[in-house]
Each structure stands twice: as structure tokens, then as C-alpha cells.
Image (cartoon, grey):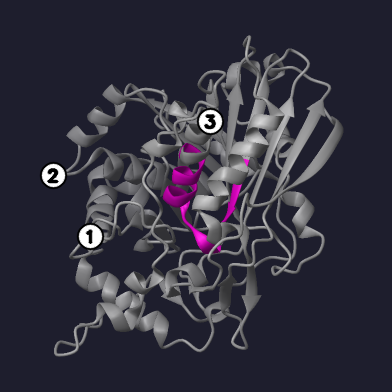
Amino acid sequence: MKITSRTRYAIKLPAPSPGGIHLLSNIDQIVPRYYTQFLLFFPTTTRELSTDNLKASLSTTLATFYPLAGRYAVLPNNALQLECSDQGSDFFEAFVDGELDDFGGFEQHDPRFELLSPTGIYKTSGDITEAPLVTAQVTRFQCGGSSLVLGVHHNVGDGFSASSFLTAWSLVSRGEGEEFLAPCFDHSLMDAKTLRKVDDPAKLFNHVEYQTQHPNVPATFPELKACMFKFPTWAIEALRSFCDPGTTKFEALAAHVWKSVTKARNLEPHEETKLGMAVDGRTRFTPPLPEKYFGNVIFYACTASSSQKLVENPVRYAASLVHEATHRITDEYMRSALHWLEQQPSPLGVFPSFCDARTDLALTSWSRFPLYDVDFGGGKPVFVGLPVAAFTGLVIFLPRLDDQTMVVLVGLYAEHMRNLLADPEFCT
């Protein structure tokens, strides 16, 4: 499958925005500088995704989310600043010489998904100040079906924020834009100085989830492989039954994946493996952040174990570590993390402590994002995924089509993925 043509359109705001400069929070600053992307496939219908409607509704949506029409400026310490310059976003329309059926019913992650994303275009310049903060591409298949990729630059928003933008865009495209709440871009709500009580300085914790030592990244990686695994609800409940009372479905499944991946990696018994999990802090602050706060509110829950203890113990052991780590993310702990980040000289000097691609695992959950309800007027998507070819050391709980199945996307070294696929205890 290959792209036969691609047209680029500059999407401008329908009217000038209020402008100004938006300071990003310390959490915004330290997340990886790439795009959070969603890939949606829409079947052949009598009403295709109209290019003109997609472009017009994207412009209207950007007017409400107007800071996303701006660009970054880089400060002397390499921190980013968001300038509301009204430069707009990019929209692409592409055509491919294939059909939706070529993906085999979306039973498995396909490296060709990467063809459907426009974000690779921005890698060539390497200048983050030139990259649009929002980019999208609709791809037309010969069968009449379409795919849509939305990319929102990670430093302006997390997955929840990107999902909110996509939902708003779809509502506007159907003439129902008044149904979504206006986003909140007040990043002072995440400012360490604002959150600390003047008469009660934040209690400081030991933040094992961060490190200031640059991780050792290999110059080249072995072959990588990404696969999807489906876990029915009854299987997840069975996992929970082997765990301590109070263990959530997320904790049980995260523990099972971590243990199974560690087993597949064949680590030495004494080697340490870490699991880092993205936790949305919006409702964990006291008081909670506004429902439509737009930005990164992702705090890392991190835990570790020796390979031998993790693999040889029942899943209850891993689940207890996951439970302890996720429950550590409290209002007090998040305030402490923001204070710790505030003390660092540059955001480029802060790294997750669980970033060894051979031994560690990073996990994020999109399972509650309502992406299967996104409708641009031609119907809802038949599949939602990630437009990348392969990766390693990352696990994503994908958006759910129904309440009966959890789809888990796992990226590993190809050798380790073969071991995982061959493990009869991992996924039935």
C-alpha cells in the first residue's frame, strides 16, 4: 500500500484571536516533544467525510481552542512558551492504492498505519518553533472508506486534551458545536507557586519517577514489533480474583502485562525492571481542576521489582506494587512533584526513570476516551488505533468499542514479542 497523492491545506482562524502568551506548566515542559495521535477508520457510507466540511469545522474548532493555532517559542533554558500567533494548523487529504479490507478487519496492529499520518513531515526540519500544534489527515481508500488522523503536539496537551479536541471537532462538523464546554487554558492552575499554600509549604516526597541523568539510548535498535491483544472482561475479572481485595481492573491487567512482558524478555534474575504508568491528576487535586482543563496533567506512578520476584510470584505480587504506586499519586504528592520540577534548571534535563527499552515498561490508558463516538456526519469509526509502525517498551490500553473487551497495544523488541505471543498464559 502506498500514498498516490497528498494535498496540504493551511487552516486559518475565521477571525483574529485574543492573542497573547500562554505559559506552559512544568508537566507540559517535560513530556516528550512529539505528537499525540489518534487514528480512526470510517467505513464506506453514502456520506463520506467531506474535505470542505472537515476544513471549515477544523477552523471553527481552532477558534475556540485558539492557543492551538499558535506556535512555540524556545526560552533560554530550553523551556517552551506558547505564543498565540494565529498561524493555524495543517490539514492533509491523501489517497492510497488500497482498501480497508487490506487491514484484515483490524484484528492486528499494522505497520502500514504509519502511512496514514502526516506528522513525519515535520521531523525533517527539526525546528519545534515551525511545527503546527495541531495537524490532521484524511486518507481516501479505493473502496470508499476513509481514515482520519489527528495529531496534537504533546507539550500543549495530554491524551485526554487531544481526545476533547477531536470530540469538539466532530460536534462542530455536525453543527452541534454548542454541546461541548469551552476549554480552560489557565495553566496557572498547575503552577507550583499557585498550588503551594503560603502558610503551609508543600510536603516534599522522593520522586523516583524522575531522573536527571540522561538515559542510555542505543544508537540502533533491534527489530521492533507492535501487537494488539484482546482481553475479555471475564478474563480481567479472573485476574482480579487472584489479587488482593480492592485491586482494580486496570491494576490487575497492568500487573499481568508487566509480569508477562518481563518473562518474555528473559532478563537475568537479579535485573531490575520498572513500570511507569501515566495517571491523570485532574480529579486527584483538591479542589479538582476544571473538567475541560486543556494541558498535561499526567503524573507518573512508578514501581520496580527484580525480574525473578516479578516472574516467579503470583500476579498478586505485581498487582500490589501497581496498586501502591497508583495510590501514591495524591494531591500532596502532585504538588510536591510540581515543586521538584520547578527547581530543575531545564526541562530537557528531566527524564522518566523507567525508560530503559530493554528492561522497563511505560503504560498509558486511553480506554475511557470516547473515540468510538466520534462522528463527522458519515457514521462512527469501526476501529481506533495508533498511526505508528512499531515501538518498544510502551503499552497502551486502547479506546474501547464496548464494555466486553479491552484491547492492549504492546511494543517490544521483535524477539521478545515472539516469546510473548508464544506464552499461553498471557492472552487466551
Magenta range:
150-167
Lower position in the chain sequence, tag 2 or tag 1: 2
What residue type is disc 3 on?
Val
Q: Residue at x 51, y 89 (%)?
A: 345
Circle 3 sits in a helix, a strand or a loop, which is it? Answer: strand
What residue type is disc 2 on?
Gly
Out of 103 and 265, give the one closest to the viewer: 103
Distance in Å between CA atoms under marks 3 and 1: 29 Å
Q: Is residue 413 visible?
A: yes
What residue type is disc 1 on?
Pro
Circle 2 sits in a helix, a strand or a loop, which is it? Answer: loop
Out of 382 and 265, give the one closest to the viewer: 382
Give the foreground label among 3 and 2. 3
Lower position in the chain sequence, tag 3 or tag 1: 1
Q: Which residue is mark 3?
A: 384
Q: Residue at x 26, y 63 (%)?
A: 329
The local crowd at label 1, few if under 14, some if 14 to 19, many if 20 or more residues have their Cα within 10 Å, is: few
Q: Which residue is mark 1?
A: 288
* Residue 77 vertical position relative to residue 268 in the rendered view, above or below: below
Q: Which residue is mark 2?
A: 246
191 part of magenta stretch: no
Whole-percent x, y for residue 101 in the image? 68, 14
Q: Are marks 3 and 2 in contact (CB under 8 Å)?
A: no
156 part of magenta stretch: yes
